[in-house]
Amino acid sequence: MKVLWTQQALEVFQSIQSRHFSLIETQEYKKDLVTKIQDRVSLIKTSIPSNQSGWEGTYKVIVDQYIVYYSLSDDHTA
């Protein structure tokens, strides 16, 4: 599965910082977060529609404290 990120999602992801952990620890967390997001989307696919105004036709998962909205390609490969 190939995950494509919107510009807005990339900006939010890049803004993740921590006052409690070092830069290296935060980078490791972000790598793990990407893996968790990809794994969760692969597992859930279309199980949870977003039902959010403005996000019609999308789905959502919650990974750690982040709500991730996504859509799948026409062949449902992401």
Image (spheres, rainbow, N blue to C red):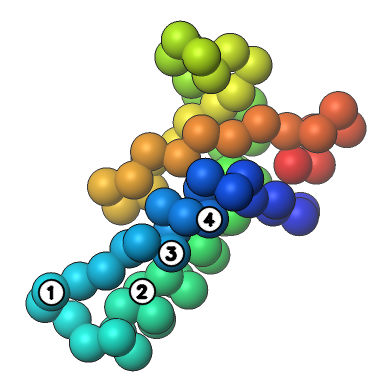
- First reached walking from the N terminus: tag 3 or tag 1: 3
Quarter of the rendering containing residue 62: top left
- First reached walking from the N terminus: tag 2 or tag 3: 3
Per the image, the residue denoted by label 1 is 19
- Left or right of residue 20: residue 5: right
Relative to residue 74, is residue 53 depicted above or below? above
Determine the CA span between mark 3 and mark 1. 15 Å
Per the image, the residue denoted by label 2 is 29
Per the image, the residue denoted by label 3 is 14
- First reached walking from the N terminus: tag 1 or tag 2: 1
Say few, some or many: other residues with alpha carbon within 10 Å of mark 2 (under 14 / 14 to 19 / 20 or more): some
Q: Going 74% across and 42% down the picture, which residue do you hit?
A: 78
Expressed as whole percent of the image width and height from the top left, the position of residue 10 reads: 53, 55
Determine the CA span between mark 2 and mark 4. 15 Å
Per the image, the residue denoted by label 4 is 10
Expressed as whole percent of the image width and height from the top left, the position of residue 7 reads: 59, 48
Contact? badges 2 and 4 (CB < 8 Å): no
Query: In the displayed image of the protein, which residue is found farthest to the right?
Result: 75
- First reached walking from the N terminus: tag 2 or tag 4: 4
Determine the CA span between mark 2 and mark 3. 12 Å
Given this view, does label 1 or label 2 mark the residue nearer the observer? 1
Contact? badges 3 and 1 (CB < 8 Å): no
Q: Please, what secondary structure does the residue beneath circle 3 have?
A: helix
